[in-house]
Amino acid sequence: MNVSVVGRPLASVESDAIVVGVYAEEKPLREPAARLDEASGGALADVLQAEKFGAKVGQVTHVHTNGRLPARRVVVVGLGKRAETTAEALRRAAAAGLRRARDLGARAVTVEVLGDRLPVRQRAQAVVEGAILGTYTFDRYKREKSDKQVETLQLAEPDGRQRREAVDGARRGEVFALATWFARDLVNAPANDVNPTHLARVATDIGKSGGLRVKVLDRVECRQLGMGAFLGVAAGSEQPPKFIHLAYTPAGRRRKRVAIIGKGITFDSGGLDLKTAEGMLRMKDDMSGAAAVLGIMRALPALKPGVEVHGLIAATENMPSGSAIRPGDVLRAMNGTTIEIGNTDAEGRLTLADAICYAAQKVNADEIVDMATLTGACVVALGPLCSGLFANDQGLADRLIAAAEAAGERVWQLPLIDEYRENLKSDVADMNNVGPRGGGAITAGLFLKEFAGTGCAVRTILSYLTDIK
């Protein structure tokens, strides 16, 4: 989708469809909807009245202009109550509007910078994010593909004083949305294509195109570093494991060094503690954290933050075979901690343990952020639309919660209850990789905390990243 900003009123733009927002409980219509209604001879207001259009967030309708406007159709989206305007409401509205325009066959769409209670830069960013992500589809493996797709998106901002901010917001929105699109494509692709070697190849391509440093460690190099937990998970698969390290360095003096870690289990069968057929069905998703990290690293060169960022992925499959780890086996992590395997299906925390050790020891990160589809227990606690957050640094946790709110993501901080650490005790090793069923998400967070060391903050995302298609 080609994104640009045009400095003309919405009513004067020639397009297959134009998208305009309407707030709830407001009559008569305000600009620019009022001008579009006048130009259409009152047809717009008639349609809204006939359909009892309540303008709830994401509600949508449309009217054909019959030559009364340069645009062929007007798509109206609800923005909700004006006093409750948020960036997420504008994203949802833009997504609904672009989907309707696409389904009507529009290839060139122009949308106003929806809303009026937030800064124009923030509104433009939200509109572009919603427009691009709202029209996301994954049809790579289908013979028959829909020919309905929006190719050109214009934001109309006639106010010259605000146009520069709109351009900047639209650019940021495009970067963020395309990074998310990229991550979604990785997650939705099947595990027979997206294996550890493929993730390493993708990381290398990102490094080359964005000027990032790339290091990919193979099994021998990981063994030399003492990554016994990671390699233990990889032992049952024919696919060779890959430890991926991407590094972005800002121009000038860096403010801090941050490591972002993504769980990279490209398929999780459960190992010898085999999952049920139903539980295994979507386990190509178990590398969603890794996909998110790759999407972030792909976006950084365009965003140019003043922070040094290291993206780390311990990529492997978790498969059953004669060489797979067994319940009762003992693995040694990179920091020397020994781990008794209570369940081979609690494998993600083993790979992340070594990745966190690497971030602390080799990267010397000031902060560590870990993103993972780690426990079904967290989905039981919060459902599929909310992520759990655990942290040993409240300042970082507060910033992450604020960032999630700005991005329209639902995040809820869960406690790290020290007494539950007793549930990870082992008779033969320093700790077990699982505890009892109750509080399973918390014990997973406590397990990872053991490997962060001091001075580093760890955030663990514990829900799936692909529920929104």
Image (tube, grey):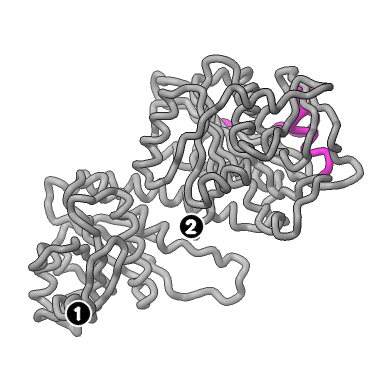
- Which residue is nearer to you in this view: 39 or 469? 469
Instruction: Estimate how packed mark 2 is, as few (under 14), some (14 to 19) or many (20 or more) residues with alpha carbons within 10 Å.
Output: few
Q: Is residue 217 magenta?
A: yes
Callout 2: helix, strand or loop? loop
Q: What residue did someone put label 1 on?
A: 47
Residue projecting furthest to the right? 322
User: Can residue 238 be seen by looking at this rendering?
Assistant: no
Q: In the rendered view, does 100 fall on the left or right side of 353? A: left
Give the residue drawn at x 21%, y 44%: 165
Is 4 within the magenta? no
Question: Residue 123 location in percent, x, y?
Answer: 25, 49
Q: Residue at x 14, y 67 (%)?
A: 33
- Kind of residue at badge 1: Val
Res. 244 image quadrant: top right
User: Which residue is painted at 34% across and 74% down in the image?
Assistant: 106
* Start-end of magenta stretch: 213-236
Relative image position of residue 271 (x, y in whole percent):
80, 45
Give residue 468's mark.
2
